[in-house]
Amino acid sequence: MAEETVDQCIESAKLKPKRDCITKGLILSGGEKWTPTSYIRLVQDYGLDTEVAIHLS
């Protein structure tokens, strides 16, 4: 989401960045074990609505 925001700012202001995004693909602390199906555990363990769990994961 941040990359999209920065890209929009660059486009709107007609800026010329010196380099591409350097944090793309950066895994945040605590995200090492995340998988595309991690949301299922939130649904099963905490009873969250699937849509909410997907958003949070």
Image (cartoon, helix red, strand yellow):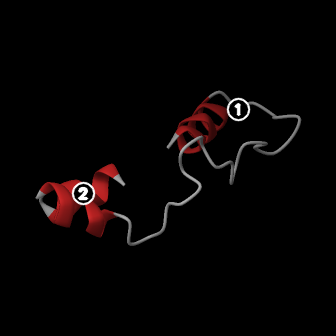
Location of residue 39 in the rendering, given as x and y in whole percent from the top left corner: 31, 63
Image quadrant holding the C terminus, namely: bottom left
Q: Residue reaching furthest top?
A: 13
Mark 2 or mark 1, earlier in chain: 1
Residue under label 2:
53
Say what secondary structure mark 1 lies in: loop
The answer to whether residue 31 is left or right of residue 13 is left
The answer to whether residue 40 is left or right of residue 8 is left
Q: State which quadrant residue 29 falls in.
A: top right
Location of residue 22 in the rendering, given as x and y in whole percent from the top left corner: 79, 42
Residue at the spot 81% in from the left edge and 45% down from the top edge: 20
Residue at the spot 18% in from the left edge and 66% down from the top edge: 44
Say what secondary structure mark 2 lies in: helix
The answer to whether residue 49 is left or right of residue 2 is left
Residue under label 1:
14
Return the mark for residue 3: none
Q: Residue type at mark 1? A: Lys
Q: Residue reaching furthest front?
A: 45
Q: Between residue 30 and residue 36, name the one nearer to us.
A: 30
Q: Residue reaching furthest right?
A: 18
The answer to whether residue 55 is left or right of residue 8 is left
Location of residue 26 in the rendering, given as x and y in whole percent from the top left corner: 68, 48
Q: Between residue 29 and residue 17, name the one nearer to us.
A: 29
